[in-house]
Image (spheres, helix red, strand yellow):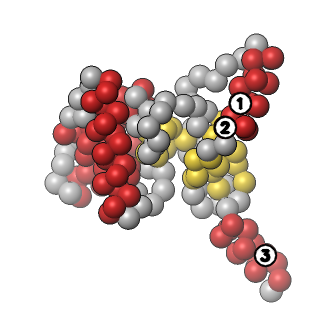
């Protein structure tokens, strides 16, 4: 994410917090900035290591408490298959549809209201509801698929 996108994502987070009457404390901001600036999903201890490299000391209890806050207010998503976290730059709370590359762990949040409605409808018909996250779809991203094709041609 470039600097403009990162700044925009932080503004979205601040706006969301202000509307909900909650505080984006210094620690919450630091962890959210780390997630936003990352090239991919981060595990809790990865975040601790990155923070330590910038001179910030974060305990495991603090990181998990802060991540729980970010999840609760829709500022981050947990990628269950990787046991990792990614920022959410959308201004609404939702159950994400996430694509996860099984080769490189790249994640992409999919915004498709029709697909989301279809999944919700079908789950309702089955008497089920999404909890603690959304739907994760595993596959291979374009780059990894291209590498696979290149390797099979050699």
Secondary structure, mark 1, is helix
Residue at mark 3 to residue at mark 2: CA–CA distance: 32 Å
Which residue, given by chain and number where applicable, does mark 3 sit on?
Answer: 149
Rendering quarter of residue 125: top right
First along the sequence among labels 3 and 2: 2
Q: Residue furthest top?
A: 127
26 or 13, nearer to the observer:
13
In the image, residue 126 above or below residue 54: above
Q: Secondary structure under badge 2?
A: helix
Label 3: which secondary element = helix
Instruction: Please indicate whether residue 30 sits to the left or right of residue 37 in the image.
Output: left
Q: Which residue is label 1 attached to?
A: 117
Residue drawn 35% across the image and 33% down it: 16
| Residue 15 spot, x, y in % from top left | 31, 36
Position of 16 compared to 26: left or right? right
Any part of residue 98 in sight = no
Labels 1 and 3: the sequence-earlier one: 1
Cβ–Cβ under 8 Å for marks 1 and 2: yes
Within-10-Å neighbours for mark 2: few <14, some 14–19, many 20+: few
- Residue 113's mark? 2
The answer to whether any part of residue 2 appears in the image is yes
Q: Position of residue 96 (x, y in %)?
A: 58, 37
Local crowd size for mark 1, using a 10 Å CA cut-off: few (<14), some (14–19), many (≥20)? few
Disc 1, disc 3: CB below 8 Å?
Answer: no
- Give the quadrant of residue 24: top left
Mark 3 Cα-neighbour bin, 10 Å: few <14, some 14–19, many ≥20:
few
**Percent position of residue 141, x then y:** 67, 62
User: Among all residues in the image, which is located at the extreme bottom?
Assistant: 154
Disc 1 to disc 3, C-alpha distance: 34 Å
Q: Which residue is at 73% across, 38% downward?
A: 115
Distance of label 1 from label 2 (alpha carbons): 6 Å
* Quadrant that contains the C terminus: bottom right
């Amino acid at each position: 994410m470039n600097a403009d996108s990162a700044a925009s994502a932080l503004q979205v987070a601040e706006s969301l917090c202000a509307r909900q009457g909650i505080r984006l404390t210094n620690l919450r901001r630091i962890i959210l900035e780390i997630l936003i600036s990352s090239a991919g999903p981060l595990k809790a201890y990865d975040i601790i290591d990155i923070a330590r490299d910038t001179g910030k000391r974060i305990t495991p209890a603090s990181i998990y408490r802060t991540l729980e806050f970010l999840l609760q207010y829709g500022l981050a998503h947990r990628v269950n298959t990787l046991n990792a976290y990614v920022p959410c730059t959308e201004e609404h709370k939702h159950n994400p549809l996430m694509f996860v590359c099984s080769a490189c762990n790249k994640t992409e949040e999919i915004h498709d209201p029709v697909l989301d409605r279809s999944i919700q409808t079908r789950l309702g018909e089955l008497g089920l509801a999404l909890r603690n996250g959304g739907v994760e779809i595993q596959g291979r991203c374009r780059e990894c698929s291209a590498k696979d094709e290149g390797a099979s041609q050699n």
